Image (cartoon, rainbow, N blue to C red):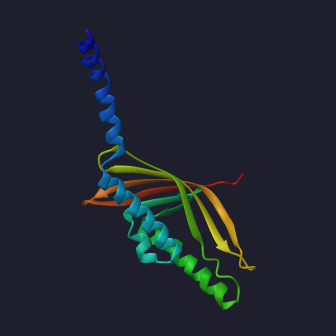
Amino acid sequence: MRLYYAVLVALVIAPVLVTAQEHLGTYEDRMAVEDVMARYVWAVDSLDPEGYVAVFTEDAIIDANGNISKGREEIRKIVTSLIQRHDDNKTKGLPTSNLYHVISNVRITFPKPGEALHQSYWQTVYRDKDKKMTAAAMGRSEDRLVKRNGKWLIQERKLTVFTD
């Protein structure tokens, strides 16, 4: 009788464990998604427009609290406008306003094969005129990535800036 219950429990639990494992993805896919998101942050913080757009699909969309950027050309403008602000401030003798991202509470799931969801909280800091590091903004992000030609890329990025 014990064997019967053990087999029954195994048959009930096994599909749940397999399904849970599928949503965690493979080790390689998880590492690749983490790498894409790290390259994204390093590119924007180092003002690298080419590195920045390289992590997005051609048809990517960024929704930053309702401000929409579609496609790589519009997305590139995010970094080129930061470069322009940096250069303008430097010319005026003002702090350059370089942003540095701090990412936390990362959660990565794989809703279906070839798709990943990366969720996190973020904070940006900058050096103010008194040379102190100051929080600029804080929020959460939800990134949908797709695997194209064996490579993970961001297809949709939704940023929610905390305003309360």
Quarter of the figure that contains the N terminus: top left
Residue located 28% across and 14% down the image: 5
Camera-side residue: 138 or 84? 138
Q: Where is residue 89 in the image (x, y as percent from the top left)?
A: 66, 84
Q: Where is residue 22 in the image (x, y as percent from the top left)?
A: 31, 41
Camera-side residue: 88 or 17? 17
Q: Where is residue 95 in the image (x, y as percent from the top left)?
A: 68, 82
Which quarter of the picture shows residue 160? Answer: bottom right
Rendered position, 136 above or below 157: below
Rendered position, 102 above or below 120: below
Residue located 39% across and 66% down the image: 55
Residue located 67% across and 66% down the image: 136
* Residue furthest front in the image: 2
Residue 7 lies left or right of residue 96; in this view the side is left
Residue located 36% across and 42% down the image: 23
Residue 34 lies left or right of residue 12; in this view the side is right
Residue 50 lies left or right of residue 158; in this view the side is left
* Residue furthest right in the image: 130
Task: Give the total of numbered labels.
Answer: 0
Rendered position, 99 above or below 64: below
Q: Position of residue 92 (x, y in %)?
A: 70, 89
